[in-house]
Amino acid sequence: MNREDLESVLDQHDSASARAALAELQVGVNFELFRSNTVPARQLWDIRSHRHQVMLDTGVVPRPGLADAVDRLHAAGAARIYLARITGPQRRFIVFLSEDLTRCIACW
């Protein structure tokens, strides 16, 4: 997956986090696709939903997009997911991509 492919996938996603991640990519920040293996969306949901709940319980304000990402990962069920990371000067994004790399499942 090259930069233009990732930009295209993010451009098709309707979340505020995906739009913010796309803006970072378009100014040339670094990104990395972890293509060594896929992970079931359900497993990622378990981790992220627990993290989100702990934040809420302890009064920590989650980064924008976490609640939406948790919901979207839950909806993806058993689908296999690739992860990508976009690292900007002010924020890091995690992008959850479909196994065929044609859709953004969630962005946080």
Image (cartoon, helix red, strand yellow):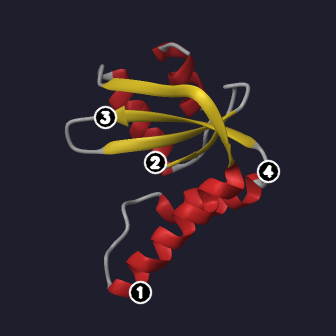
Residue sticking out furthest to the left? 89
In the visual, does 77 lie left or right of 19? right
Please tell me which of labels 1 and 3 falls first in the chain. 1
- Distance from disc 4 to disc 2, alpha carbons, whole Å, reads 23 Å
In the visual, does 97 lie left or right of 95? right
- Distance from disc 2 to disc 1, alpha carbons, whole Å, reads 23 Å
Kindly state the secondary structure of the residue where label 1 is placed. helix
Q: Tag 3: residue type?
A: Thr
Which residue bears the numbered disc 3?
87
Residue sticking out furthest to the right? 78
Which residue bears the numbered disc 1?
57
Residue closer to the observer: 22 or 36: 36
Kindly state the secondary structure of the residue where label 2 is placed. helix
Q: Tag 1: residue type?
A: Asp
Q: Tag 2: residue type?
A: Ser
Q: Residue at x 32, y 43 (%)?
A: 92
In the visual, does 80 lie left or right of 22? right
Among the 4 quarters of the image, the one containing residue 35: top right
Q: Are marks 1 and 3 in contact (CB under 8 Å)?
A: no
The answer to whether 1 is drawn above or below residue 70 in the figure is above
Which residue bears the numbered disc 4?
78
Residue closer to the observer: 38 or 71: 38
Marker disc for residue 17: 2
Q: Tag 4: residue type?
A: Ala
x and y percentages locating residue 17 in the rendered image? 46, 48
x and y percentages locating residue 101 in the rendered image? 67, 25
- Distance from disc 1 to disc 4, alpha carbons, whole Å, reads 28 Å
Kindly state the secondary structure of the residue where label 3 is placed. strand
Q: Residue at x 65, y 56 (%)?
A: 43
x and y percentages locating residue 85 in the rendered image? 42, 35
- Distance from disc 3 to disc 2, alpha carbons, whole Å, reads 13 Å
